[in-house]
Image (cartoon, grey):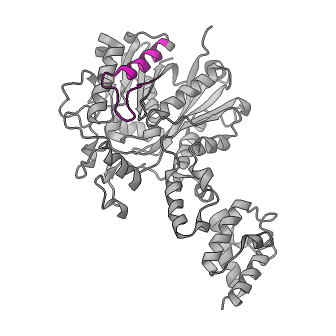
Amino acid sequence: MSKTRVVITGLGATTPLGGDVASSWEGLLAGRSGARRLTDDWVQNLAVQIAAPVAVEPTEIIERVKARRLDRNAQLAVVAAREAWADAGLEDSGLDKERLGVAVATGIGGLHTTLSNYDALLKNPRRVSPLAIPMLMPNSSAAYVGLEFGAKAGVHTPVSACASGNEAIALGLDQIRLGRADVVLAGGTEGTIMPLPLAAFSQMMALSKRNDEPERASRPWDADRDGFLLGEGAGVLVLESYEHAVARGAKIYAEIAGAGISADGHDIAQPDPTGSGARRAMERALLEGDLSPSDIKHINAHATSTPQGDVAESLAIRLALGSATDNAVATAPKSMIGHLLGAAGAVESIATILALHHRIVPPTINLDKLDDQIELDIATEPRKLADGDLAALNNSFGFGGHNAAIAFKTI
Amino acid sequence: MASTEEIRSDLAEIVNEIAGIPVEDVQLDKSFTDDLDVDSLSMVEVVVAAEEKFDVKIPDDEVKNLKTVGDAVAFIERGLNG
């Protein structure tokens, strides 16, 4: 049975580098860091006082009364989804809404709402918002994106920590291939730069403590890396069957060749040091996309800047691609935007697609001294990609041992 | 003591903040649901905010009787004067 071809026809993002795709992409190419030292009162007692907040507050864009009813997660998702929807030219396309689906992931869910309502509860239970549940539930962002555009096919929320964004894209791909939708708004969102996540990730020893040099804190593959930088933002992609896109004359950025999902079966938080789970995710993405390792010319790595994770992924890439690894330009956007948790896979898929579309790979910054356990060809300056057919992989891995790799190709 | 107009004006600010209804539309003869389109969950928020603003208790059983802005203003006035 031949697979339905699925293409990308719209992109939307809000990130630490910009309030839309164009400004975020420009920031990535320029090697700009979105990190900064936090100045909020609540940060003073924390071991980690740095993060990468979004460049544009979502409340500057979303109407005030509507914004009140949306957790920060959903606000960010709606901002990204509006851009993707407009970019795809879907507004007046006559799209059958019963054929429009949503897959918007989150790693943590509506934590702002949870915590602020818990504070309210302790003061007076009547002050708990009657909208607390619809705001804090993990599916809130997907539901609000669906409501925004009247989606009436499946509206889903994959939750697999930092693999969530890629899982949403994989799920969107499946929905179209299974014939359940013609168009899916797929992506991820996360807006949890707050004391609890900063303290909790810090207690796990997962975060960089480079408080005095926030812009140098996220340094994937560097010998002196000491953990990830917490970021926030959202990315939404319009996935569409090739047939549907061509019939309405849509512009096409790239094709999703395949998705590979696996579980480590190793540990709740540590990556499998052999890279076996991540390897299987990449191999499955290639298999599903009828691609061979030599087709992959670019890898947008998960590369969070943690000591163990970066090494395990490098090993996994070598196992999956073999000697073809040497012909694939690797980069780590987290060096600039930090780790967007449930949004990471979505925002980085957008970067991967734009790298194929514009045939240029954004740089990895802060790579001063390469860890000698890393064997990858890393772009430390913007790197041009060749003409002709190209394919690329975007990796995302999450606590829980979740691995999700998406293979994109030029069209 | 707060006048009827002062209470209406403060209540209008609350309704505006929560439901986005223009302050000038929140007049005594207007029904919260039929005229102002304040839904039941927003009404819960309006009631709690009003309790805090005016330092009165508005029991849940009473809320269903507060159909118009005037009903709410009168209830708050009674609370303040009682």
Q: Quadrant of residue A245?
A: top right
Horizontal side of B54 relative to B64 (left or right) equals left
Q: Is residue A319 magenta-colored?
A: no
- Residue sitting at the far bottom: B1
- Give above or below for A374 relative to A120: above
Image-based side of B35 in relation to A229, left or right: right
Query: Which sits in the foreground, A48 or A28?
Result: A48
Q: Position of residue A314 (x, y in %)?
A: 30, 23
Where A3 sits versus A250, above or below? above
- Position of residue B52 measured from the top left corner of the image (x, y, whole percent): 60, 76
Residue under the point 42% across and 15% down: A283
Instruction: Tell me: A86 left or right of B8.
Output: left
At 80% from the left and 65% from the top, the residue drawn is B35
Q: Spot the residue most to the top.
A: A1
Q: Is residue B39 visible?
A: no
Where's residue A263, x and y in %? 44, 25
Can residue A269 be found in the magenta stretch? yes
Left or right: A185 as drawn, with respect to A327: right
- Specify the quadrant of the image occupied by residue A6: top right
Q: Quadrant of the N terminus of chain A?
A: top right
Residue A299 percent across, percent down from the top left: 37, 23
Total label count? Answer: 0
Q: Name which residue lies at 55% across and 49% down.
A: A75
Numbered range of the magenta stretch: A262-287
Q: Is residue A143 visible?
A: yes
